Image: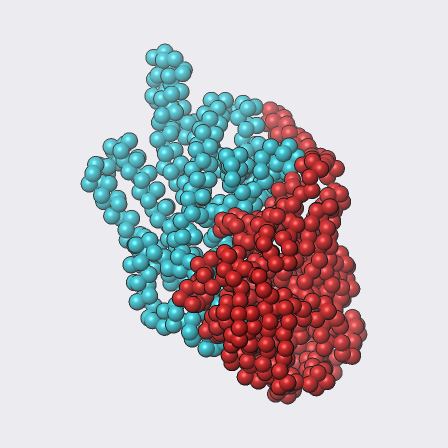
Amino acid sequence: MLKKKASFMVLSIFIVMSLWLVGCNSNNENSENKEPGNEPRNELVYATAKDINDMNPHLYAGSMPAQGMVFESLVENTADGIKPLLAESWDISEDGKTYTFRLRKNVTFHDGEPFNAEAVKMNIDAILSNASKHAWIKLTTKLAETKVIDEYTVELVLSENYYPALLELSMTRPFIFLSPKDFINGQTKDGVNGYHGTGPYKLADHKTDQYATFVANESYWNGAPHLKKITAKVLPAGETTFLALQKGEVDFVFTDDRGADSIDVEAMNLLVDSGDFRIVRSEPMNTKMIVANSGRTNSPAADAAVRKAIWHSIDRETISDAIFNGTEAPADKLFSSNVNYANVDLPQRKHDVEQANQLLEDAGWIGHDIREKDGQKLIMGLYYDVNSSSQKAQAEMIQSSAKKIGIQLDLLGEESTSIANRRSTGEYDLLFNQTWGLAYDPQSTIASFTSEASYYHTTSGIPEAEELYKKIEEVMGSTDEETRKSLYKDILTIVHDEAVFIPLTTGSVTVLAPKDLEGIAFKQTQFELPFDRMHFE
Amino acid sequence: MGGYMLRRALVAIPLLIVVSFLTFILNTLSPMDPAEVVLHTQGVPRITDELLTETRAALGMDRPLLTRYWDWLLSCLRLDFGDSYVTGKPVWSLLGPAFVNTLQLTLVSVIAVILLSVALGILCALKEGKLLDKSIRSVSFILTSMPSYLLAALLVLYFSVKLDLLPTNGMDTVGSYILPVAVITISYAGIYFRIIRSSMLSNLNEDYVLFGRACGLPERKITKRILRNSLQMAVSVFCMAIPIILGSTVVVENIFAWPGLGTLSVKAILARDFPIVQAYVLVLAAAFVIVNSFSDMLNAWVNPKLREDR
């Protein structure tokens, strides 16, 4: 009797406690948690799942948004094309091999060193001396010489004409400039003494795995930024980020380098409903997709019919609505039409179960539950990133629609590093991936079709592989815009016809910011945000 | 006494060597090419064969396994655990501060766990079978079985967001200790107070208690005796709580963004940053072995019988 009474009491206490806590939560949504005062705020704290890491601008471990605040390139990639940044103007020789840059005067590095032709040469030489790390950026293999003409004029000589040269010079890294004083023995590959760039923000303080603070560069050549202090706070768990946003300890989050948001759409909407935040979304920046291993001969993924059937079986509208709440649009080809050279007419493959079944039947895959061909069952593994909440949900959806057409997909969640490793060793049937994103699309993504570490296994099994690789090599060296257009068209048509890249949705950068923060814009890349243009009302 | 201590300490050494060898071997068993892992974790966008060969040589991967192990072991003795694959910094410069941060959290938590479990253990043993005993045990049962991330989230929601009393994360002020320590304490005190309680109860039935009562000793004095006898047994349990908590703060550290061993090790494991993983396992194993030896010695010191047995 006593026992029953006691457990009843305990249970009631627990229920009351839980209700109370839930009540607290809903009360809070209406409460104001901003500090009072009319002074416009000029500080921003953003949450990041990872530390900013080694900021060395000529290596790849650092956080790109952070590097983007501190370092600058010669030219900037904008929606209207390449614009001046540290270079005021430039000339390109007739043969396309010599680029002459006139540098902006009166620019200094954060440590007071002048930015001049010598500094440019020193940086570029340091990058080229570590060329094997920069194999992805073709310009490093084409740059023959950097000449100092006078204090503010520098000449880059290429071994052959290379049309994306200016574009690659505009990228977040590696062609960005570090103060010569930070070099160790004239090099940067084995570490640097400091992180002094020319950008709008200086790195002021960094506590590994806790936070990093950036303060405004008051002598920035383009005028000091409005936000005087930006803190990158390391919050590994999304729950904490959400609670810290509610409390006001953090007031800004954005899509990270890997395309993952630290808090989900629902949490963002809750915060917006509280009245303190707003969401700003960029144009499509990249394409999320499933990559099929055409080079794995013993896998059904090597069969074009199977790849096309999967393409048809996926209901992208539902993925976009149910998983992304409409924040990502369905994608029907590898690159969305706003990507350079990608506005190509390609036959659409709509969500069509009938046609998917037909394709499999025609290719000889028969059977009821799981189809078979020559004794091989139609079973494939689909690898997804365990840290991405949306990939798992998509994988489950794709699995169930594949089942309807007699394909069994085994879902295998792994770390992003291990997935990248599978991609390079070819030990996969299907895996989730995304294109490199604006500014890198299409040229960098397409260049990586031939790279063992990227999409070689994806593309090597198709009958037109040789032709594809030849065209890719041609397009990178072509001088004529029309030839380039036609080559890109051919390349895109081949991979579309072979269905090796099965598009899912177009990803964009999402920013959750305080309601009164103005000037939120995006760059032509998913890896940086122009914090220097933001200000509070 | 000194001889026993020495013997006990010597036993620990082969144990640590075995652990270090296993750690090293397990990491090399991973099917991935370490050079490739290094380059991926450094974020190099395109990996070429040339770069792989270069990196393998730089890591010394071209040497035989045992040679590598021997070199690693020797440098470990000098607290040089190699360089992190990801950042290239010495492992100790990353592990050291993280270890101190976690140790701070652990020690404060262990003190709180001991205080709370001793208090609750005594209370429950004295009120055995009464409503108070049952309520404490039921509530602790529920709280202990609650996953710590849920408990942490509820506490943060209430004390940080709603009441605005404590920070939601970080380790900037004394206040930032309160919530993580509370979560750890609630999770572990619920287990440990049962040990105190049952050991108190078994002592309660001993003859010396009956004898004391028969002699008319005041109840307060009897309780004190029982407590002293029960605590002796609890010493080793509490000693082991230190490495256990040290190695299991992962969830709490992640939620509270505590820059400690848990956060570091998870990050290292996910990134396949083997030098850090190896050092982490070795440090934790050493902590277990050292604390275990220490608690044996402590018990031997308290109870001379144990020394004679060996």
A389 and A471: which is toward the camera: A471
Examine the rendering and report whether any part of residue A452 can be seen. no
The residue under the point 44% across, 67% down is: A187
**Rendering colour (chain A):** red
Q: Is residue A75 left or right of residue B306?
A: right
Image location (x, y in percent) of residue A317: 78, 64
Q: How is the image coloured?
A: by chain
Image location (x, y in percent) of residue A241: 62, 47
Q: Is residue A232 left or right of residue A325?
A: left
The residue under the point 35% across, 42% down is: B291
Image location (x, y in percent) of residue A23: 71, 34
User: Which chain: cyan?
Assistant: B
Q: Quadrant of residue A22?
A: top right
The residue under the point 38% across, 28% down is: B230
Quadrant occupied by the N terminus of chain A: top right
Image location (x, y in percent) of residue B232: 35, 31
In this view, the residue farthest toward the front is A150
A419 and B195: which is toward the camera: A419
Examine the rendering and report whether any part of residue B89 can be seen. yes
Q: Is residue A206 left or right of residue B15?
A: right
In this view, the residue farthest toward the left is B3
Count of residue discs: 0
Q: Quadrant of residue B228?
A: top left
A136 and B82: which is toward the camera: A136
Judge whether A436 appears above or below A232 on screen: below
Judge whether A382 appears above or below B79 on screen: below
A206 and A246: which is toward the camera: A206
